[in-house]
Image (tube, rainbow, N blue to C red):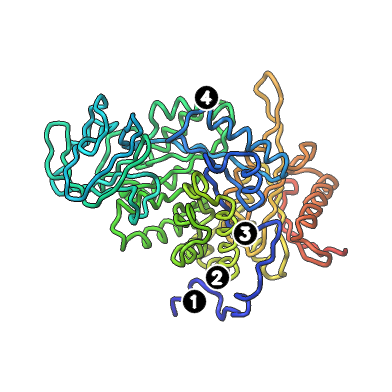
Amino acid sequence: MHSSHLLLEEPIRMVSILEPSKASFFPAMTKIVGTLGPKSRSVEVISACLKAGMSVARFDFSWGDPEYHQETLENLKTAIKSTKKLCAVMLDTVGAEMQVVNKSEKSISLQADAQVVLTPDLGQEASSQILPINYDGLAKSMKKGDTIFVGQYLFTGSETTSVWLEVSEVTGQDVVCTIKNSATLAGSLFTLHASQVHIDLPTLTDKDKEVISTWGVKNKIDFLSLSYTRHAEDVRQAREFLSKLGDLRQTHIFAKIENVEGLTHFDEILQEADGIILSRGNLGIDLPPEKVFFFQKSALYKCNMAGKPAVLTRVVDSMTDNLRPTRAEATDVANAVLDGSDAILLGAETLRGLYPVETISTVGRICAEAEKVFNQDLYFKKTVKYVGEPMSHLESIASSAVRAAIKVKASVIICFTSSGRAARLIAKYRPTMPVLSVVIPRLKTNQLKWSFTGAFEARQSLIVRCLFPILADPRHPAESTSASNESILKVALDHGKTAGVIKSHDRVVVCQKVGDSSVVKIIELED
């Protein structure tokens, strides 16, 4: 089989290249995670980000204090109310990250071929000759010839803000290095990355635990991004920690794969985690460049087959300072979609970039174009083959709903769900049309008061490709009488009509529970 057949529906209509993309309520099926920070924390900018297509807001705790992030989050809530766009919250931990500490915040100039010493003595002042680090075990792990990378979060390798070092000798706890390229380090903290070396630091640090149990609990975070996940045990420990924090029992844990150690244990990590974030900035340093694409494709395929969301980072670095991405970056975004990514995560581009809103809309437009040529037919067959027989009851209903929707050219699939699992399974089969996931709240009690679940489940589908959640009226249970189902269906259909994805005479596939059985039905709209 010719390789291009694997990705694209042949032949591609070339005229579509010239047609302007139709602006719609759903800019793209692929989701966009935006990191909020100095350039993207006002109500005005966040509102514009939501309108441009951001559906998850990421709060990165490797910088900034909880009060700063709280102010940003309050602005996000205001923006959600005014735009009426749902948005989930992701807390990103610091994790086992080695950092150079520059207390004075004066910029440090490093010259190629000169020597610099990395020391765990934090009493020292950072300078061109000495860089204090937050980890005292580096010397034990390094040997002559090893490479170390120091820089800000934006590692493109072409920057003058990051530096490659080569270890020339280890003396006691200090590591003496030769500087390989001239650079100026500016700021108070820089990430330090030692290629393919095991760092004996906990994945969930004490600082992380404190932030999660205060800021995280207060704000009922939807997602926890677990930085530097290296083993399945890291995810299990994080889940155990969350289970003791009330509402955070429902928080989804996304394992962030940042180094070779995480890739080596990828299969067991995937089993434990709710989703995966491929942190390509760090992976790109830990892996030889020629291996990066292979691990990306392999990891995304595994996530797709497991029906767990996969998120890709570092796609349009150059948009931090420019209005347009490079040709390579634009192609990279499209390939991420064709490879099966659920969401694209923007870091520095929205955090401190000059064009946060434009970046989100550009990435959204590229994703929408790539989705048009995604070979759904081949993907569907591959997934069904991978799942094998006999299929579970839910899996068979989900795949049947997608097959029916494609056969009858339905404009949307509407799925009633209370846990969100049924909707995620439908999305696993990558339908070509949006899935309106109608989340039916459930009543629960802790012996003191009654409350409804549903908001978590609705927001957590905001990171899954194809899924667009609607929170139903809690008076309608998921397995209710036909009368109440009809009224929720009407709400969903009205929502689709307002959004412009359902028109008169369209066909719609509905997936719902009636009694103990699940039903897939096709309805044709009259007007």
Q: Is residue 58 above or below residue 291?
A: above
Please name which of the two marks, 4 or 1, marks the residue nearer to the observer: 4
Q: Quadrant of residue 433?
A: bottom right
Q: Quadrant of residue 294?
A: bottom left
Spatial separation of the CA atoms under disc 2 and disc 1: 8 Å
Badge nearest the viewer, 2 or 3:
3
Please report whichever mark, 2 or 3, sits nearer to the chain's N-terminal start: 3
Q: Label 4 crowding class (10 Å Cα cut-off): few <14, some 14-19, many 20+?
A: few
Residue that mark 3 sits on = 28
Which of the marked residues, 2 or 4, is nearer the chain's N terminus?
4
Give the structural element (helix, strand or loop) at label 3.
loop
Identity of the amino acid at label 1?
A: His
Q: Residue at x 63, y 50 (%)?
A: 422
**Residue wearing tag 2:** 375
Query: Which quadrant: the C terminus?
Result: bottom right
Which SS class for mark 2? loop
- Report the Cα–Cα distance between label 4 and label 1: 50 Å
Q: Measure the C-alpha gap from mark 2 to mark 3.
A: 16 Å
Nearer the camera: disc 1 or disc 3: 3
**Where in the figure is residue 243, as x and y percent of width and height?**
51, 29
Q: Nearer the viewer, residue 385 or 69?
A: 69
Query: Quadrant location of the N terminus?
Result: bottom left
- Residue 214, numbered label: 4
Q: Nearer the viewer, residue 437 or 51?
A: 51
Whichever of callouts 2 and 1 sits on the residue coming sooner in the sequence is 1
Q: Earlier in the sequence, mark 4 or mark 1?
A: 1
User: What amino acid does circle 3 point to?
Assistant: Ala
Q: Residue at x 38, y 30 (%)?
A: 205
